[in-house]
Image: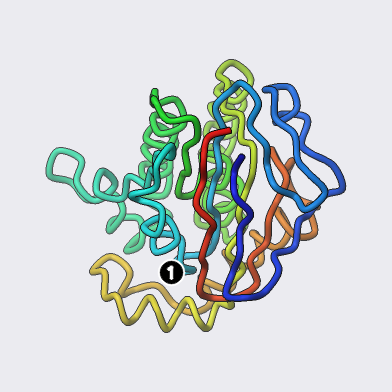
Amino acid sequence: MIGRLVCAGVRPVLRGSSPSSSAMSRGLSADHRGNLLRNKTKSTICVEGNIASGKTSCLQYFSNTANLEVLTEPVAKWRNVHGHNPLALMYQDPSRWGLTLQTYVQLTMLDVHTRPTDAPAKMMERSIHSAKYIFVENLYRSGKMPEVDYVVLTEWFNWITKNIDLSVDLIVYLRTSPETCYQRLKMRCREEERVIPLEYLYAIHSLYEEWLIKQTSFSVPAQVLVSIVDVCFIDPITAS
């Protein structure tokens, strides 16, 4: 059984009234508390949230958990593609480099989704879904991505999700205020993030709220467990 998520003493909020069809089709169910139960197939949990919302710290908490493989975002790849840094280039000039970065993000996230694992469950930092629904969408809505680039990325995304099993069993949304994220971002001092303004974090937050809370923008591939505090703890995961 996959343990219940507990966030700093505040009960998490489970979005949706029933287990996702994806989870059910893969032999998974949920109990009355929203605990995900693994029957025969492997489980995938995606931890979602704004930049500096606490995703990496949350995953690090599980890095030595038995029966669970933790997969962080492949940020190192985005910062160094044969000596090039498309992540930094995108932040510096999103209109020029947005398509370049997001094409590579889509590829590397696809690799994470499909990477074989011996563990009965894996926990990912973000997903190919948020790459498209949050970050590509933000570039397009803000006028920094031409429509033709947006359409090409959408065609690729639609083909991938139609032809490759990228099933997700649970989404954990770390719902953190943009102001808190901005303070953390400044404290961790990643070189590429020095140019990120607070307004950008507000835009990303708004897109996450539309997708995972209001559920009015794009399809949600699994039930959503919402953490409404900044520090996250999760019960150990044990095989059933």
Element type at mark 1: loop
Whether residue 236 sits left or right of residue 11 in the image: it is left
Q: Residues within 10 Å of mark 1 (few under 14, many from 20)?
A: many
Which of 60/220 is in front? 60
Q: Quadrant where the N terminus lies? A: top right
**Residue farthest to the left, as pictured:** 83
Whether residue 45 sits left or right of residue 15 in the image: it is left
Tell me residue 84's x, y (percent): 18, 46
Tell me residue 10's x, y (percent): 67, 74
Tell me residue 185's x, y (percent): 37, 75
- Asked if residue 7 is positioned above or below residue 75 in the image, the reply reads below
- Asked if residue 57 is positioned above or below residue 181 in the image, the reply reads above
- Asked if residue 217 is positioned above or below residue 108 in the image, the reply reads below
The quarter of the displayed image where residue 22 is located? top right
Which of 20/69 is in front? 69
Whether residue 167 sits left or right of residue 89 in the image: it is right
Taking the spot 57% from the left edge, 75% from the top edge, the residue there is: 8
Taking the spot 59% from the left edge, 22% from the top edge, the residue there is: 41
Q: Quadrant where the C terminus lies? A: top right
Taking the spot 58% from the left edge, 64% from the top edge, the residue there is: 174
The quarter of the displayed image where residue 117 is located? top left
Taking the spot 39% from the left edge, 64% from the top edge, the residue there is: 57
Tell me residue 176's x, y (percent): 57, 73
Amino acid tagged 1: Ala
Q: Which residue is mark 1?
A: 52
